[in-house]
Image (spheres, helix red, strand yellow):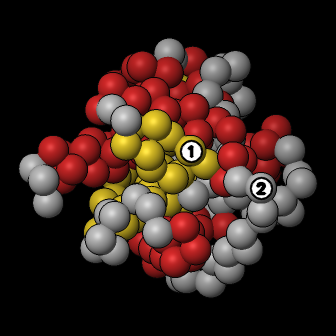
Amino acid sequence: MKQIMIATSNAHKVEEFKRMLQPYGYEVRSLLDLDEEIDIEENGTTFEENALIKAKTIYDKLHIEVIADDSGLAVNAMNGEPGIYSARFLGRDTSYDVKNQYIIDQVKDAQDKGAQFVCAIAYIDADGHENVFTGVVEGEIYDHIEGAKGFGYDPIFYYPPFKTTLANVSEDQKNEVSHRGKAIQMLLNYMKEGK
């Protein structure tokens, strides 16, 4: 089984990646499995730049295949915020209930309630070759928090084809249409083609 390092300590993301990569023969490891903490300075200005910064930092340290993602919510009526600051928006320790309600309040009077989940996945193979794959899912900010599944901003992200928020659907349904699911599919297609 091939080992691949996912450059995250977010347990939700690790589970998503495991579900998607294990069928392809990968043993998925993450920063949670390391004895030492690796300091990553995310100072890029785009999702793609930040994903690559994370991947390079891990690859330079461990020299194994690495996947790093940077993802977030971009709200039209908020000029693309929270964007690359999605995890740190309103403070890293602020609960998503508070963050979600704040965003609902910001867009409630806006004509354009459109939003995108964006995920950029950087992949560095065992030989150090770099690639970035970006997936986007279009939706709207819902008028209230709804759904207990998913995590983060899922409970306010209304996905019109499902006629509900992403927090109201199964993981499998979400992965079929999600920004991360799309980016991972691009990555898997690339891996299958043997680069």
Q: Residue at x 66, y 59 (%)?
A: 86
Q: Position of residue 158 (x, y in %)?
A: 51, 33
* Tag of residue 29: 1
Q: Is residue 51 above or below residue 4?
A: below
Q: Residue at x 58, y 40 (%)?
A: 14
Whichever of labels 2 and 1 marks the residue nearer the N terminus, that label is: 1
Specify whether 164 is left or right of 8: left
Q: Residue at x 25, y 44 (%)?
A: 188
Whether the residues at callouts 2 and 1 have beta carbons within 8 Å, the answer is no
Residue closer to the observer: 52 or 161 = 52
Q: Quadrant of residue 167?
A: top right
Q: Position of residue 25 (x, y in %)?
A: 33, 32
Q: Residue furthest left?
A: 193
The residue to which callout 2 is attached is 35
State the SS at label 1: strand
Specify whether 25 is left or right of 172: left
Dot 1 amino acid type: Arg
Dot 2 amino acid type: Asp
* Tag of residue 37: none
Residue 154 visible to an observer of this rendering: no
